[in-house]
Amino acid sequence: MLAPFISGMMPTPATASALRSLTAALPATDVLLCGPSASGRSSLALHFALYHAARSMLPAMFLCRQEALEQAVPMLPYNCSGDDPSLHLLHIKYLVNHVDLQRFAACLHLLRGAYSAIVVEDLAGLVRTDDRNALVRTVAMLVEGVRSYRAAGVGGSRCALLVTDSSDEARRPRYIHDRWFPATLVLAPDSLQGGHEGSYTISAVAPSCAGQHHGPARAPRGSDAAEAQHQAPSSVQCSYRAADGHLVLEALHGLGPAPPDGAGGPVAWP
């Protein structure tokens, strides 16, 4: 689950060998990434989009607010230069508010081109934190729209969905997201021993532990059910920090011994 996010981080000598313990084979799934500002969340969202685009050679859609993108430009993967061909596969679409996102979601089933991933950066910037009805409606329309797009069979059956949001649990309870996202990743300041100042961790959170569900959750259907079973919460946690215009992977926790050279599935920039 972490491969699309950490593949763009600059590894240290210690983490370079540990990366071989992570598999690079990923199903299409719906992922929520929660994290505070200054945690590198937008950069991780960009890495996710470019990872899927580079592996499939299909474009990735990146939806965001223009002013937010211009004020804090995401960092590129450490081994992705400004003339990298995968950057031409990144399609950026600017949104103003949740109404724009709802309109996009409502028309997804009409999308004719094949996309490897759809990324919505900073949901909190599109939907007011006090308007939970708009939040639920927007997330529901987006997830159902992506599932309809996958089912349409236009080449996007493996299209992954990533939505990023703030980690303010009090103003935006996690149970709202748990209904729609089988996989949730949380960014938090690194409290593990040896973490540098300004370091963060990225780890998976089980929906049943993320918050209390209000009302019956809809059971996954078809391929979504298989994806939900595949996406069991991972015990792997990584620590990273920003340095010299890149994200640096400092440590991987919860991994077994790294496989020998040539074994397993290396996680590397395609």
Image (cartoon, helix red, strand yellow):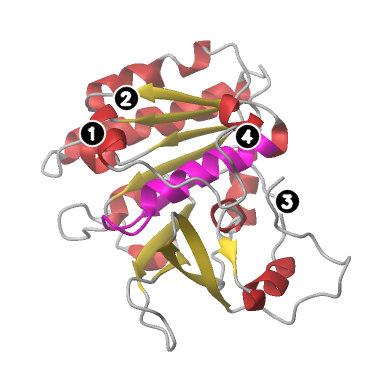
- Give the numbered dot on residue 126: 1
Question: To which quarter of the image does residue 126 belong?
Answer: top left
- Expressed as whole percent of the image width and height from the top left, the position of residue 176 reads 29, 48
* 75, above or below 256, in the image: above
- The reply to whether the magenta stretch includes residue 226 is no
- Tell me where the magenta segment starts and ends, as one range: 30-54
Q: Nearer the viewer, residue 112 or 48?
A: 48
Q: Residue at x 46, y 50 (%)?
A: 44
Q: Which mark is residue 84?
A: 4
Task: Kindly report the distance in space between the C-alpha atoms of the residues bearing marks 1 and 3.
Answer: 32 Å
Instruction: Please report the residue visible at 57 percent of the width from the left and 31 percent of the height from the top.
Output: 87
Graded by Cα atoms within 10 Å as few (under 14), some (14 to 19) or many (20 or more), the crowding at tag 4 reads few
The residue tagged 2 is 101
Label 4 residue SS: loop
Q: 217 or 165: which is nearer to us?
A: 165
Q: Earlier in the sequence, mark 1 or mark 3?
A: 3
In contact (CB < 8 Å): disc 1 and disc 2? yes
Foreground label between 3 and 4: 4
